[in-house]
Amino acid sequence: MGFSQLRLSFAYRIVSVNLGSFSQAGEAGDAEYNPAVPELPEVEVLKRSLEPHLVGRRIRSIEVREVRLREPVRPKLLARHCVGRRIVRLRRRAKYLLADLEGGYTLVIHLGMSGRLTLAAPATSAEPPELHEHVTFLLAPGGASRKPQRLRFRDPRRFGLVLSLKTATLDRDRHFAHLGVEPLSEAFSGGLLAHRAAGRRAPVKSFLMDARNVVGVGNIYVCEALFRAGIHPFRSAGRIARRRWDTLAGAIVEVLCRAIEQGGTTLNDFLDGEGNPGYFRTALDVYGREGEPCRRCRRPIRRKVLSHRSTFYCPGCQH
């Protein structure tokens, strides 16, 4: 089955998910388990869950309570670009959530390490804003809701981003200009990866996690894809045969699509709007399974640290 057919077969099976909220702050007692940011599947699930609630609705007002995020929030510019404008499309680029607005502007949100984006009723004296609710968008009735709602951005660790940019020049902005290929796009292939990896001595895991090569394939999913492809994460990217790149590219697509289908990966408090966790963690073959037997060869799963990140692999199945 080719990549196009593989993508389509999963696309038709994507389960409906409710409004998502994501936070990955790491597992207690082991800093190495701490993912830097929500990965591509979590942001894609968030986008799909928000679409029926946001598209077609107008932003009535914006309240900024804390400007000190990864980059300072600019309340006046945000209001000028967003207030009074209708949301016409929701999309994702890498791990950024993008809301295209009337008038040629785009609201850009990145969840950082602990960000959550959820819908709620407008704040009142009886129900004030939540702790760490740094930016709130009041939405006019529309879409799936007949009442005003607030879209709230909460971020305890404040590594997230909330900004607005011109839609026409978004791809040239410094946040996006360096980004590589989307792994779920038609442009992604084993041949593309092989070409970019030629002559590289970096470990293949580091190569895949470099957003200049391919976006959104974070620590969890790269460990899983390398296992499914039978490739050792420490093997030099430039020493992988072309046929193995084809296998690896297919494994990346499969792992990401299955994670999206199952609502993302539960690490700590990754829940949807109804309090339901993602279920892909139950399907993880190597990530977080140090010392447990490999499901294929029964040898113990190993963990080593690469670039300050835990790397899980099977010494028997991956070469």
Image: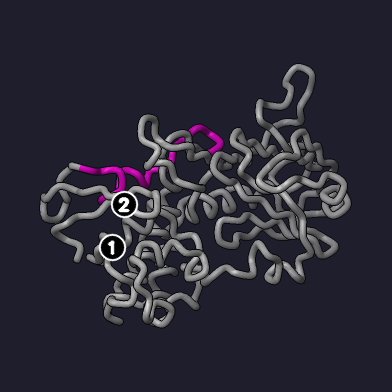
> Is 61 displayed left or right of 243 in the figure?
right
Asked if residue 287 is positioned above or below residue 136 in the image, the reply reads below
239 displayed left or right of 94: left
Q: Magenta region's main secondary structure?
A: loop
Q: Which residue is mark 2?
A: 311
Q: Secondary structure at mark 2?
A: strand
List the single residue furthest toward the top: 126
Image quarter of residue 160: top right
The circle on residue 234 is 1
State the quadrant of the C terminus.
Answer: bottom left
Any part of residue 75 in sight: yes
Up-down relation of residue 101 to residue 153 (above or below): below
Is 239 covered by the magenta stretch?
A: no
Closer to the camera in the image, 79 or 241: 241
Question: What residue sits 13% from the left and 58% below the top?
Answer: 316
> Given the image, on which type of amino acid does mark 2 rest?
Thr
> For the point 51% across and 64% down, which residue is it?
211
Please provide the residue range marked out in magenta.
Answer: 272-290
- Dot 1 crowding, Cα within 10 Å, few <14, some 14–19, many 20+: some
Which one is nearer the viewer's eye here, 314 or 62?
Answer: 314
**For the N terminus, which image quadrant?**
bottom left
Q: CA–CA distance between discs 1 and 2? A: 9 Å
The secondary element bearing badge 1 is classed as loop
Q: Is residue 275 magenta?
A: yes
How many neighbours does mark 2 have within 10 angstroms: few (below 14), some (14-19), or many (20 or more)? many
Nearest the eye: 130 or 272:
130
- Residue 212 is labelled as none
Residue 274, position as x, y percentages in the image: 53, 34
